[in-house]
Amino acid sequence: MLELINIHKAFNNNQVLKGVSIKVKKGDVIVILGPSGSGKTTLLRCINFLEHADIGEIIFDDLRVNVKTASPGDISRIRKKTAFVFQNFNLFNNKTAIENITEGLIVARKIPKSEAVEIARRALNKVGLSDRENYYPSMLSGGQQQRVAIARAIAVNPDVILFDEPTSALDPELTGEVLAVMKQLAREGTTMIVVTHEMSFARDVANHIVFMDSGVVIEEGTPEEIFIHPREERTKQFLSRILPVEDYVI
Amino acid sequence: MELNVKFMIDTFFLALTGVPATLSITAAALIISAPIAFFMAISRIYNVKIIKQAVTAYVSFIRGTPVVLQILIIYSLLPSLFNTIIKSAGWNINVFDINPIIYAYIVFSLNTCAGLSEIFRSALLTVNKGQLEAALSIGMSPVQAYTRIIIPQALVSAIPNICNLTINLIKGTSLAFMMTVKEVTSIAKIAASYGYNYIEAYLDILIIYIILCSLVQILFALIEKYFGSYRAHPGSLAKAN
């Protein structure tokens, strides 16, 4: 469904992505792991052109886009097939929870307001925030804000949702409620690409794990392959540092 | 020394007839400057080549010269310049019949542009870039993202500074008397000059400016309260950590 081919991206002289290719099938939950600065977030942002990659191709169903020559129309089409959940939520502060969701539906997708409100209510219900629809972001906790952001992402009915460290800005107590929503989405067959440091999520929910370091994919495979039988020394090293000893063998 | 109370009261009402001119210069300067200042701010934020340098130079030029000097230069330069242009174009207009308030509009707009562009620039930067990205990520165009998400929030944080600028502008328009514009200050000064009742006239206009500026402050406070309602606890910064 979605394929990234040989994506390169540099910031000034700093080569962040050095030719990354990833294939995503419908219903996949792909988790991208790797140390800080390995290019995970940049890769995610290149998919919907929040960062403009330097070299590479993005294939989305029948849409084939060379990143170098991507037209604003191509970018807009790809953005309408994807949704993005940010580390810092990035809710619209001047809009209530429900308006945050209807905004994209009404303004970008020209859906009639009454229908948009209905979709937004369903999305809020899914993330368990029906009682907060008229709250402004400043009145919600971090976990609630991120759940509204997820509702905003699912409401536009994207083919794939991109999660960029969705729980990194939350304290451990609030992480759980966001992960629960994401697990629910995965169970319903939502296609997701998730950059995270939540190893339990990667292990239990992902069907495919991509391990990146210094701008390249070191190895990829099922959670079992990566967590139990990592082939690359770099992967073993990373996992041994990030996983508690008793977790290492499931 | 005794105040001529009757003169003072008469002049007060006489000077009030200059309020429309004072306010029209203020309003014209704000309305003319706002869109220009906005694009100046955007071109600086987005590093638009050449325009950015031009804007930066313009802002620092206006900031670096006294308004009085700008008035003197424009008021002595522009009429002759217009005259030459009109003469060579063969139009039958007498430049020296142009209402001097036009020159006031020009001077104060030039000034306000510079100040307002800096206010807009800092206000736009207060809205985190993430909200723009979020808007783009759900399919909104950059223009939609700006008009519906970024600008409304930026304006709210700009309100105190815009209020400040407006008040300075109102007070600054008193210099329009140098261009023989009949606004509050000039009317009072002329009335005072007949019988040397300057103290009374100055007290009159002092009261008028205080009233005008207070009304403007109240107006802006209401605007801020209305449009800033999404900020859960206005003024809670001191309490928050």
Image (cartoon, coloured by chain):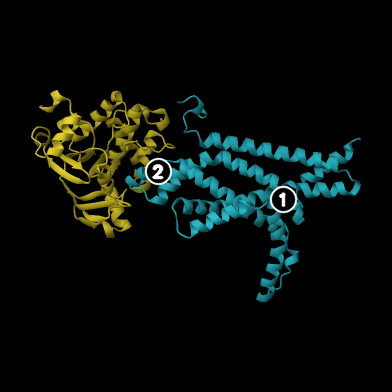
Chain colours: A yellow, B cyan
Question: Picture coordinates of residue A240 (x, y %)?
Answer: 16, 30
Q: Taking B222 as reference, is A165 left or right?
A: left
Of labels 1 and 2, the one closer to you: 2
Q: Taking B22 as reference, is B113 left or right?
A: left
- What element does badge 1 sit on? helix
Q: Can residue B20 be seen in this view?
A: no
Of the 4 image quadrants, the one containing the N terminus of chain B is: top right
Q: What label does residue B194 carry, if any?
A: none
Q: Name the residue under label 2.
A: B129
* Image quadrant where residue A24 sits: top left
Q: How crowded is mark 2: few (under 14 residues within 10 Å), some or many (20 or more)?
A: few
Taking depth in this image into account, of B15 and A115 the one nearest to the observer is B15
State which tag comes first along the sequence, 1 or 2. Answer: 1
Question: Picture coordinates of residue A47 (x, y %)?
Answer: 25, 48
Q: Which residue is drawn at 71% across and 73% down?
A: B92
Q: Residue at x 85, y 43 (%)?
A: B198
Q: Residue at x 49, y 59 (%)?
A: B51
Q: Name the residue under label 1.
A: B21
Q: Residue at x 54, y 50 (%)?
A: B117
